[in-house]
Image (cartoon, rainbow, N blue to C red):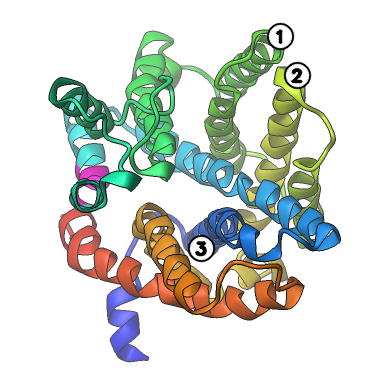
């Protein structure tokens, strides 16, 4: 146990009231993302069971909200760091690059190598100029905000993260937010989120960017002179409301915007309930050690688990041909498939992310 603690425990900045449940929330978020890919890959083995397929599809839809929870936590942490003290932009961005790129480069090279070994599975264009340009676009984290297919499927969210890193220091400087009151800043960001959501509801667009603002507002509320508290029961209720809200039978840009707005409020309430009082039962639940350790390595897990899971299912197809095996196979495979993804992702965390991105400064 001590051996594991030495490798998966991290010393983070922040108050003791929010660090541990925040780590657990990352673990919860990345498990939601795992469910998206697990349901996608096991689909051929359960496709004949119509009733259970509806349930599995719902899990897939709910799982997509894991990325939105990551955005909220990122919005909270990055904004809090920048609003608390003035930082040189290039120094701030260099730290963000160091945080993102070592693990990303390692996975990027793995994907390039596998694309050369298995050209039938490759997303890289066949012609050299187009292939090189495609790799440059992916290396610069452009897929996501731009209509480019990501080579690493989950890397689209890194485009959102990088956009936020570039934009928020500019917003703070241009609007002189450090000189404003907390009420002014909160009103400003809520107004920006409202305008963005309405625009995206009408015209479409990257409405999930407002999830960063949910984290920003959370930071302002957490640091307000008049503390706002929320009972764990209401935090759990908010979580359930947000996750189930993704299942609303609404399509189109308006439906997507509404679901994101529900997550905006729900994840804000969840985090508020967990960050304010670490002794309450909900933050203690998110502070469960295995969940926190998963959260600490969540970036490495996020980047690599999809590839690991695909390899697992390809191996499964050799011993269990695709056919309708029913719901029992879903539940039988879920724990071992998840456990197997921990092996390569832990290696990425221990060999690359921790020493090169999380080493003490």
x, y percent for residue 186: 60, 24
Instruction: Tell whether position 234 is magenta.
Output: no
Which residues make up the magenta segment? 98-102
Any part of residue 35 in sight:
yes
For the residue pair 136 and 221, the one nearer the viewer reads as: 136
Query: Which is in the foreground here, disc 1 or disc 3?
Result: 1
Query: Which badge, 1 or 3, is on the more N-terminal residue?
Result: 3
Count of labels shown?
Answer: 3
Q: Residue at x 34, y 75 (%)?
A: 343
Mark 1 element type: helix
x, y percent for residue 106: 19, 53
Q: Quadrant of residue 298?
A: bottom left
Quadrant the N terminus occupies: bottom left
Q: Pointer 3: what residue?
A: 27
Q: Residue at x 53, y 27 (%)?
A: 209
Mark 3 element type: helix
Q: Quadrant of residue 221?
A: top right
Q: Quadrant of residue 294?
A: bottom left
Q: Pointer 2: what residue?
A: 254
For the residue pair 9 and 174, the one nearer the viewer reads as: 9
Query: Which badge, 1 or 2, is on the more N-terminal residue?
Result: 1
Q: CA distance from mark 1 to mark 3?
A: 34 Å
Q: Pointer 1: what residue?
A: 202
x, y percent for residue 21: 55, 63
Q: Are marks 1 and 2 in contact (CB under 8 Å)?
A: yes
């Amino acid at each position: 146990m001590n051996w594991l603690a030495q490798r998966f425990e991290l010393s983070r900045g922040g108050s003791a009231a929010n660090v541990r449940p925040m780590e657990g929330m990352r673990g919860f978020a990345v498990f939601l993302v795992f469910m998206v890919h697990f349901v996608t890959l096991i689909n051929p083995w359960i496709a004949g069971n119509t009733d259970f397929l509806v349930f599995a599809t719902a899990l897939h839809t709910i799982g997509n909200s894991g990325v939105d929870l990551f955005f909220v936590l990122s919005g909270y942490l990055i904004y809090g760091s920048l609003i608390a003290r003035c930082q040189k932009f290039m120094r701030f961005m260099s730290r963000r690059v160091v945080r993102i790129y070592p693990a990303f480069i390692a996975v990027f090279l793995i994907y390039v190598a596998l694309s050369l070994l298995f050209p039938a599975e490759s997303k890289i264009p066949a012609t050299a100029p187009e292939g090189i340009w495609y790799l440059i676009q992916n290396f610069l984290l452009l897929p996501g905000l731009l209509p480019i297919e990501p080579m690493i499927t989950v890397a689209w969210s890194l485009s959102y993260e990088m956009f936020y890193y570039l934009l928020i220091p500019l917003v703070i400087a241009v609007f002189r937010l450090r000189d404003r009151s907390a009420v002014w800043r909160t009103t400003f960001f809520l107004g920006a989120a409202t305008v963005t959501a309405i625009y995206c509801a009408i015209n479409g667009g990257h409405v999930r960017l407002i999830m960063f603002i949910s984290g920003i507002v959370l930071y302002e509320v957490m640091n307000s002179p008049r503390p706002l508290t929320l009972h764990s029961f209401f935090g759990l209720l908010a979580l359930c409301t947000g996750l189930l809200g993704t299942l609303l039978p609404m399509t189109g840009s308006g439906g997507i915007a509404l679901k994101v707005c529900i997550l905006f409020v729900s994840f804000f309430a969840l985090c508020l309930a967990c960050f304010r009082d670490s002794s309450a039962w909900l933050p203690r639940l998110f502070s469960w050690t295995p969940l926190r350790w998963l959260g600490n390595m969540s970036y490495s897990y996020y980047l690599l688990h999809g590839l690991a899971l695909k390899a697992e299912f390809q191996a499964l197809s050799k011993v269990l041909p695709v056919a309708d095996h029913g719901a029992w196979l879903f539940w039988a495979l879920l724990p071992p498939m998840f456990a197997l993804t921990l092996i390569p992702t832990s290696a990425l965390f221990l060999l690359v992310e921790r020493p090169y991105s999380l080493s003490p400064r």
